[in-house]
Amino acid sequence: MTKKSILLIVIFCIAIASFAQKNCTISGYITDKSTGERLINANIYETKSLKGTTANNYGFFSLSLPKGDVSINASFIGYTAQVMSLHLEKDTTINFSMELTSDEISEITVVGNRSNLDDAQMSVIDVPVQKLQTIPVILGESDVLKVIQLLPGVKGGTEGTSGIYVRGGGADQNLFLLDGVPVYNAGHLMGFFSVFNPDAIKAVKLYKGGFPARYGGRLSSVVDLSMKDGNMKKMEGNFSIGLISSKLSLEGPIIKDKTSFIISARRTYLDLLSKPFIATYNKQVKDYGESTNGGAFFYDFNVKANHIFSERSRLYLSLYNGKDKGFVKNKDTYEWYENGQIHKELDKEDLSISWGNSIASARWNYLISKKLFSNTTLTYSKYIFDTGLFFSEKNITENTLMENFVKYYSGIQDMAAKVDFDYFPVTGHEIKFGAQYTRHKFTPGVTKLSFTDMDVDAQNLLDSLMGNRKVYANEISAYIEDDITLAPKLRMNVGINLMTFSVEKKNFIKPQPRLSLRYKVDDFWSIKGSYSRMAQQVHLLTTAGINLPTDLWVPVTKKLEPPVSDQYALSLVFDLPKNLNLTVEGYYKDMQNLIEYKEGASFVGSATNWEDKVSQGRGWSYGMEVMLEKNIGKTTGWIGYTLSWSNRKFEDLNFGKVFPAKYDSRHDISVAVTHKFSDRFDIGFSWVYNTGNATTLGFMEYKEAYVPGTSYYYDETITEYSGEKNGRNNFRMPAYHRMDFGLNFHKQKWHGIRTLSISAYNVYNRQNPFMILWDTDNGVWNSEKGDYSIQPKTVLKQVSLFPIIPSVSYSFKF
Amino acid sequence: MAFLISCTSCLKEINSDEIYTSPKITLNAICTADSVFIVEVWGNKSIAGYMSDFVFLKNATVKLYTDGVETEKLVYKDKKDFNFDGSESIGREPFLPTSAFRSKTIVEEGKKYKLEVSHPDYKTVWSEINVPRATPIAKIDTTMTTFKPYEYEDSYSKKINVRMRIDDPIDETNYYRLIVSAVSGNYMSGMYYDSKGNAIPNDEYGYISVIRDYSNNNFQSTDPILTGNNDVNNLLFGDYDNYFSIFTDELFNGKSHTFSFTLSDYLAYNVSCSSDTQFGEFYRIYITLQSITESTYLYIKSLEAHKAFISGILSEPVQVYNNIENGIGIFGCVSSATAVIQNGEYPIESVKYIFEQYYY
């Protein structure tokens, strides 16, 4: 079936390609005039026939049109549209350099982003990167993933964190691609901030369904982030100081219009601010022979450079490195008197924990012909978690030393090579195909123990490694995707992604067919439908709702099959007056071979035999999403509503009965609006409402039963997890809702523009539930039968994390 | 961030009026073949509110159905009515419920039993089981060996290696529980005190105190069948080291299987060094293979994990299996086959035995 499908697609493409020979091709790049940045997804169309296309991820487009007089329109949100007329006789190259425009003008001149109505692609959202600074978030730290959390179909996990759960999927089912390289741990500071520095990001696309065949490897979403290329025209920069971190970015030409670079870096500084306090403390305890040091921070930096060799050839080099680190160091010197002698000992303790990603990529764009664009990529991605505890006791008098060292580390490393082709045989027809090879190295968790005692004969008493050995895996994938206009109103995107994964002498082959159809009813609305199968070659062992660095990426194994999902979606897309777009989508997603920790198990304890700790089962989710958005004008933003269900069924969990997923939420509402009053002042606010998360909570207790042969007195109390529903996730926490508000004051200075941002998280100070637990109150006096004692009462309590949190930040763009 | 959270987070009480409660009968009865039904009937209680004790529902009506026919209404016996006889205990079942509904009917292997409990304040509850047939121990071999427990010390210990074969019944899923337990019989001289308070021995009234030995009655094994199913306990606490193992016949269904395991050096020492056998002292190790109902298997397995659960946000709580319709608890049964390793004689007609009870 799979072979037949591929053959049919290839034959179809060849037929179309031969037909294409009668036309002429107009191709080129669309760039920002002031910076030279290539504009992704800019629209190009011929004004008479209305035939058009969109620029690819490198700003390249190719249109095949009949010979004669043609008029080409290029447009992109926020830019003044350009129209170019020419007499077409042969293949021609045209590059568009587009100018940014003010919002007032854009409402009139920009026809609008018609691609959503015209594209066969559905369930995709272009995240408004330009608006990131305006949408208020916690502590004033703008964050791509926190904006994505505000979109319909996406649910944030624990409050304040940047985890995303898309259409009932899990935290591990999202593929984050930074310039085409997968990022495994997208969180800093336990996930409270994402690793993506918004200053370095040019474009972000979120795919929730109807996945194009070029993407694969995760079940629920693809977040495709493109870094800025660097200004080709002039040097410019930006720095900002916030409550948590400071950022600096610098970009400019190395050779004007040929080579450019961008460097972005940020670092938190709570550890630096705390140093004077630690020094003061150390002064106080110095006389006792003690000293301490500690801190926690994260940093990350992005570097990118690119060089244009010719119109046909361009090279991009990207680097990302980010690290979180926490440490505590203690020293304690003390003396004692023994056997007529003063003894002196120095004790040291050193605890450290760190984790981070390193990513590198080299991409080479080469235009093979005016219809065939190629991109060759080499990538490297590494995530490592490392924690260590060292302590020593040195008897200075007797010159003896005892040292203990425990180190635990885990990680994942990928090296990949891939090649992608974009082929444009005729207007309205684009074929993408490519292949990729990835070598994975998993280190699921290794503990190194060392114990040395200089006081005994056997000096190194213990020096051993425990835990899981390294696991190597090979992944080869290939895809072909055909986006074609079948009839004036009917457009189709069809393709297949074939993934093979070899691990532990076991091969998995997963063909993943994809199909999207669009029927354009008239100029104002379209109907779209899609089916996509996705497969995943890795699992994430995670226990908590928060993104912990201890979360382990592990490969599929002989025992644990690759997760697979089948998603069906249907949508209605409307272009409404006043630049409003309305999308209504319904979906059903079935997920097989999901994993969850068994009840009672977690990463606590041994990291070995992780396969025994988990259970494999099925999940399914369905729902409806509504999004009303406005991307043009002084007031922009969106209103989103999601009605959804997400369930799980595991043989080993909940006695095999169906239970709601942890982040199953019936109603989600999100509103994100920004308004620009003038060039000097704009505001932003957001409001979210979610049905409370599901959690497992016992309400009743009962007596343990006697089992014949038991050798202890059975008097345990058993908690009964029943309630409105029985079993796992039987209780709904109270609903979550919150409003954030922000003001931005801009001022033109001699060297650039300064922006002062004042924002408040959780404006009306809602106490949102983070956790529900049983606890006792202060109790009352019990005076029954002369027993005067305090009798506490067990009550249900809610833990809330964040009240209203105001913040201020300062940034300067030069 | 942790600092920020510690500064900003808060704890507040949720209105207790919204708390869901569901009063139910707890029916607990895991019975033993060839013995009477012993049924505990309790009320469950809400976690919310002031601390309170569980209430035994003495005035409940407990009916027993055998193969679909009502055969008996069980009678409540209080602790004081409980006739503690030696034959029932012999140190092997010291913790049998003393306040319970007891039957006259003897549990028979292969029969279907249903218990139905009604009480004016609760919904009527019921549960039904088929009593499994005991799988006999087809062959058992034991050998005692000497080993050096510590490399650097010049001391030796003994251990007992056991090879036990069973023939698993064909065409049915069987659930097993292997238990190692021990009973010691220790000579106690009769004593009386003179007028000055001195203890005077009187051998005429000497007796053997029979008690269950709780210390280190464990066994170790590398057999994946014995070790593999104790998952949550194992995962949390490391190596397998228990006095019982619970498993199914998934890996040897309908076939013979020989288990290999080693009894602790403590047991080996006691069974080989029991002194004063001339006074009637003895030491007896029971190796018991219980054939258990599926409900009992699921109950024990989940109960062990429930007890081991460390509360917190890092893992999901463990639910305990329940097979009581409209209520909560467990109705199950065990049928046992037992092998004995013994030093000394028991019983001896001329020796007086006192069965001691210890509650922990």
Image: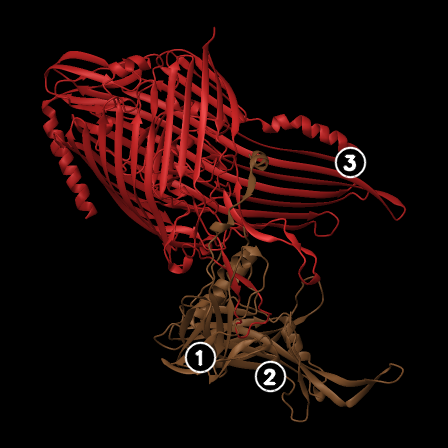
Chain colours: A red, B brown
Instruction: Tell me the chain of label 2.
Output: B
CA gap, disc 3 and disc 1: 69 Å
Q: Residues within 10 Å of mark 3 (few under 14, many from 20)?
A: few
Q: Amino acid at mark 2?
A: Asn
User: A714 or B265, which is in the foreground?
Assistant: A714
Instruction: Tell me the chain of label 3.
Output: A
Q: Which mark is residue B135?
A: 1
- A238 w.r.t. A589: above or below: above
Depth check, mark 2 against mark 3: the one in front is 2
Residue indicated by mark 2: B83
Residue A457 in view in this figure: yes
User: B267 or B36, which is in the foreground?
Assistant: B36
Residue located farthest toward the bottom when viewing the structure as drawn: B350
Q: How far from the left and from the top, in percent, is residue A99?
A: 30, 12
Q: How far from the left and from the top, in percent, is residue A463?
A: 62, 49
Q: Residues within 10 Å of mark 1 (few under 14, many from 20)?
A: some
Q: Amino acid at mark 3?
A: Gly
Q: Which mark is residue A289?
A: 3
Please report contact status of discs 3 and 1: CB closer than 8 Å, yes or no: no
Question: Residue B124 is drawn in which quadrant?
Answer: bottom left
Question: Residue B195 is drawn in which quadrant?
Answer: bottom right
Q: How far from the left and from the top, in percent, is residue B314?
A: 51, 48
